[in-house]
Image: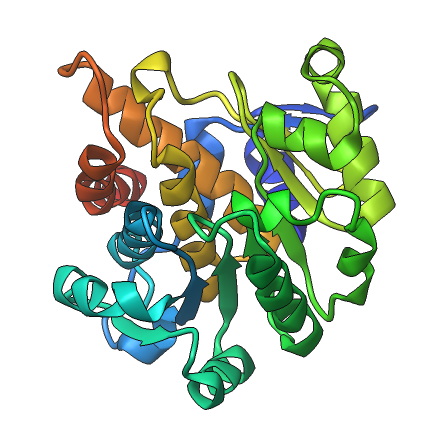
Amino acid sequence: MERTLNVLKKNKLGAFLFSNKEITIDEGIVKSLLKPRVEEGYKGDYGRVFIIAGSKGYAGAAYLTTEAAVKSGAGLVTLCTPKELQDIMSIKLTEAMTLSYEDTEKINNLIAKSNVIAIGPGMGNSRLTYNILSETILKSECPIVIDADGLNVLQNKLELLQCKNNKIILTPHYGEMARLTGISIDEIKEDKVKVAKKFAKENGVILLLKGHRTIITDGEYVFLNTTGNSAMASGGMGDTLTGIIASFIAQGYEPLEATYLAAYIHGYCGDKLAEEMFCVSASHLIQELPFIMKDIISSKQS
């Protein structure tokens, strides 16, 4: 957070309202914060991402989350998925490693040595998902990004969040937020900043509330995203965002910083693609990610 505040104060970038600590993310902020690759860098410098995702019928969620983490620059990415999906995932994910839920020893090893864990996409709203999530929260010392079914199994079980050993990032859409809070979608939309900020503060988490003008907050500061469009309204976009957030944390960004940067770049990619496309799929966006990030960094350096 200190890096963001220094950028805002030094360059007078973004609409920073000191009275209520709201920051509108713009391209200037992102250019100032996005890090170029160092000449002597190697894969270990760009972090280890451990993704727990997928179930029968929802292999795509696991694939998209993992591929997004790879394409947004993570050094090493491993997917943990059900045994019946592992073979196909290992074929499709040529730049990531895979293991199954049954590989307990390897899972514990990865939980211990990863820089970030992303969990939930496509796992199913089940007791198994809850058990895996609770074990991960209890054992992990690194930040955890929780999305999709990882959020669904937290309904009426938010006390689990108090067991965390590091930052937890929750990424709900309005429906998931309604289930987490018990507040209707209409009520959330009426004052989404207030609802998001209150929830983040009470639960000690970073919250990314998806929607038109996505909100990111840690309960103190609020970041308002300005990118994204309705051409992106398709399945898999949330999984993709989860992978990008995890990737940025692994690369050394602070969790809050990683979350709002990921939201901006995710939407910015969609905006660029929508200039030429009627609808934008998650796969389109993932393929565009490294080019968009290069363009942003190059324009900063020129």
* The quadrant where residue 221 appears: top right
Q: Which residue shows up at 42% across the image and 63% down it?
A: 51
Q: Which residue shows up at 44% across the image and 49% down it?
A: 121
* Front residue of this view, candidates 203 and 71: 203
- From the viewer's perspective, tell me whether residue 260 is left or right of residue 32: right
Horizontal and vertical percent position of residue 248:
44, 55
Q: Which residue shows up at 83% across the image and 33% down it?
A: 198
Asked whether residue 251 is in view, the answer is no
Q: Which residue shows up at 18% across the image and 34% down it?
A: 284
* Front residue of this view, candidates 21 and 239: 239
- From the viewer's perspective, tell me whether residue 266 is left or right of residue 11: left
Horizontal and vertical percent position of residue 52:
45, 63
Residue 176 versus residue 204 in the image, above or below? above
Horizontal and vertical percent position of residue 15:
62, 21
* The quadrant where residue 181 appears: top right
* Front residue of this view, candidates 218 and 17: 218
Residue 110 versus residue 211 in the image, above or below? below
Residue 270 versus residue 265 in the image, above or below? above
Report the residue that reaches farthest toward the right: 202
Residue 233 versus residue 57 in the image, above or below? above
Pick the quarter of the image with the C terminus. Answer: top left
Q: How many marks?
A: 0
Q: How is the structure coloured here?
A: rainbow
Asked whether residue 54 is in view, the answer is yes
* The quadrant where residue 276 appears: top left
Horizontal and vertical percent position of residue 10:
59, 39
* Front residue of this view, candidates 130 and 219: 130
- From the viewer's perspective, tell me whether residue 287 is left or right of residue 220: left
